[in-house]
Amino acid sequence: MEFLVIGIIIAAIAVIGATALFYRARGRRRPVAPPAAGPSVTGSAQGVPAGGGGTAVAERAPPVVEAAPVAAEAEVLPEIEVPEPTAGRLVRLRSRLSRSQGTLGQGLLKLLSRDKLDEATWEEIEDTLIAADLGVGPATELVGRLRTNTRVQGSRTVDEARALLREELIALIDPTLDRSLKVAKHPAADGAPERPAVAMVVGVNGTGKTTTTGKLARVLVADGYTVVLGAADTFRAAAADQLQTWGQRVGAYTVRGAEGADPASVAFEAVKEGTGMGVDTVLIDTAGRLHTKTGLMDELGKVKRVAEKQGTVDEVLLVLDATTGQNGLVQARVFAEVVDVTGIVLTKLDGTAKGGIVVAVQKELGVPVKLVGLGEGPDDLAPFDPEAFVDALLQ
């Protein structure tokens, strides 16, 4: 009996322990949460006909982050450049200009500072001047003035010879000539509205007219003028593109036509556009042409006449390559007859040892050298200054 009671007690303890273990294990289980209800949408939004079964439950989706709108790629325009001031350019570039001194400057100084200036020496001086592209007439004139001065003053030192030569060369180049560019806007007068000044750039092939026109635009912008460019060289495919690039760099607008278009019509439209925009100056670049081609020279005259239907052409600038020397004078003479040249632009003056071409071309045409090109840089076009030029020759 005693053993039976003990067995019942042990069995009861076992049942109680098992029950406790069962409920403890059940309490450790995680409750499964019901699926969260998503936003309610109409059946039509889910492809279910409206009214066909109530609403549908959509699964909750992660939030959609909209990408920022991509801006349209802007047209990339070249940065507007600020050209260097024109004042003092010729002085700054004296080191390049001084390449001319070997023939004209220093050569003459050595001869003039000799102890004895006999007839043979004077002939050598005249030959030196002619070799420097001064021309026979101007060379004879200069020798005569030098002989008179040295006869009166007697022998001289190198410094005295330099002072004398400087004085005579400046007088020969003629500092009294008006070398200003007529590029200022015409004010309204007699009922006519204001209009821009018009300048044409002309010359033979290979003298650098388009580049000179672009550099001239920089000169004008540097001096405070507003400019429109006319690409009237329609025969050379790259000319209009080249001129437009020059214009964009300084903020100048370019008027151009199709390749092979009538250059006179482009010039006409350029002046018309410049008038409408109210700019100060219209620069017209023309195609290079040989002075012996009568048809092309006649066409150049037509360009000028058609442009003048919008207003007078104030400047006709003839571009000459200084390295061609006396050969350029024949070209200059023909151009002057066709379009009434008002000024000379001498390019590549830094590439020649013959500075006398400045005097020769002025004597030949009776018009002044107004600008000189002294290098390949964009701001290497300088207003011509006779005194600075002579000082560079004699330094």
Image (cartoon, rainbow, N blue to C red):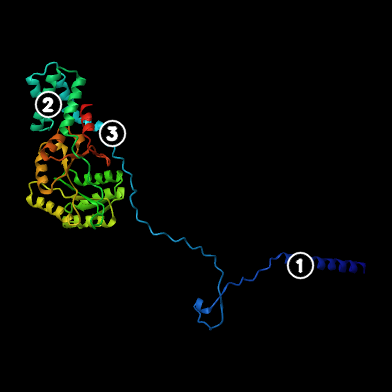
Can you say which quadrant of the picture contains the N terminus?
A: bottom right
Left or right of 50 in this view: 169: left
User: Could you tell me how far apart the alpha carbons at marks 3 and 1 are, in whole angstroms?
Assistant: 104 Å
Question: How many numbered marks are there?
Answer: 3
Residue 169 horizontal/vertical position (percent) = 17, 29
The type of residue carrying mark 3 is Arg
Which one is in front, 99 or 330? 330
Ranked by sequence position, the earlier of labels 1 and 2 is 1
Q: Which residue is mark 3?
A: 92
Name the residue at 11% across, 45% down: 336
Q: Residues within 10 Å of mark 3 (few under 14, many from 20)?
A: few
Which one is in front, 139 or 23? 139
Which one is in front, 230 or 57? 230
Q: Quadrant of residue 173?
A: top left
The type of residue carrying mark 2 is Arg
Residue 49 horizontal/vertical position (percent) = 50, 82
Which one is in front, 32 or 150? 150
Q: Which residue is mark 1?
A: 23
Q: Residues within 10 Å of mark 2 (few under 14, many from 20)?
A: few
The type of residue carrying mark 1 is Tyr
| SS label for mark 2 | helix
Inspect this view and state whether residue 387 appears: yes
Ranked by sequence position, the earlier of labels 3 and 1 is 1
Inspect this view and state whether residue 130 appears: no
Q: Which mark is residue 145?
A: 2
Query: Marks 3 and 2: which is nearer the front?
Result: 2
Residue 230 horizontal/vertical position (percent) = 22, 53
User: Could you tell me how far apart the alpha carbons at marks 3 and 2 are, in whole angstroms?
Assistant: 31 Å
Left or right of 147 in this view: 231: right
